[in-house]
Amino acid sequence: MKLSHRLETVASFVSEGSIAADIGTDHGYIPIYLVENGISPSAIAMDVRPGPLKRARDHIREHGLEGKIQTRLSDGLEKLLPGEADTVVIAGMGGELICRILERGRRLWEQVDEWVLSPQSELERTRFFLWENGFCIMDEAMVLEEGKYYTVMQCARRDGHGTEIPAPAEVRYGPVLMKKKDPVLREFLEQEMKKLETIACSLAGSGTERAAARRKEVEEEIRLAKEAWNEVQGSD
């Protein structure tokens, strides 16, 4: 199974030897990859829609992995039982939906060793939800694929570690990405600052209160982007 760069990054965050449950599995590519490459001895492919689950089942059969990968119709984590999976993967959906899935699966929080998340939007909201609910972001990666930037996070319950309130720039751009001085984040920040400065300039000529309020918001966004930029540019 050959994965895209984004999905390969997601799979790389799954610890070797762990049984993985892929939520919103779609074609079943991640479970197939994990089992074929000996990362997971078995896996569970789950989706809320019968159509994608049938596609996943067909692909699993094509790879001869029916005995190692279960398919399960499930709304988020609803049909996952405690102790069935060491790792939960939730990728390819918006951050708001990921937060809802996590919230509704609260009963599993202490039963799962690691959570691999890749929100396609609302990253700031997702990171704050994780911090607020006792999760620690252990690792992060940012990838560029077909002109879009994607972030992957490996998370675990904090167990008393990392309880400090994250800085606003860390919530927006990723504490681990900033600490690692991630080169893809650096590239993203360059584009982000240019885009925000263009917006700020376009608002400068308007005399409306609404434009002035928006300009103030954009200036704060520029400040956070520059703070993150300075962090990724700095030396250790």
Image: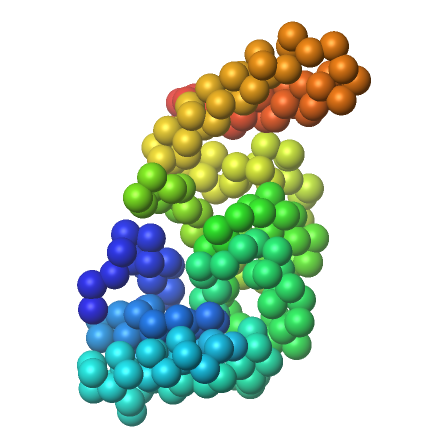
Kindly identify the residue that appears in the image at 33 percent across and 53 percent down: 6
Q: Quadrant of the C terminus?
A: top left
Closer to us: 78 or 52: 52
* Quadrant of residue 7 within the rendered picture: bottom left
**Residue 160 visible within the image:** no
Percent across and percent down for residue 160 are 65, 56
Kindly identify the residue that appears in the image at 48 percent across and 27 percent down: 192
The colouring scheme, among rainbow, by chain, secondary structure or one colour, is: rainbow
Kindly identify the residue that appears in the image at 66 percent across and 58 percent down: 134
Instruction: Establish if 102 lies above or below 21.
Output: above
Percent across and percent down for residue 89 are 45, 66
Percent across and percent down for residue 158 are 60, 58
Kindly identify the residue that appears in the image at 50 percent across and 59 percent down: 93
Q: Quadrant of the N terminus?
A: bottom left
Percent across and percent down for residue 66 are 28, 89
Closer to us: 63 or 39: 63
Task: Name the side, left or right, on which 179 lies relative to 218.
Answer: left
**Residue 176 visible within the image:** yes
Task: Give the residue at the far right of this rendering.
Answer: 209
Instruction: Establish if 2 lies above or below 46.
Output: above
Closer to us: 168 or 119: 119
Task: Name the side, left or right, on which 213 lies relative to 125.
Answer: right
**Number of disc labels:** 0
Closer to us: 140 or 22: 22
Instruction: Establish if 166 lies above or below 136.
Output: above
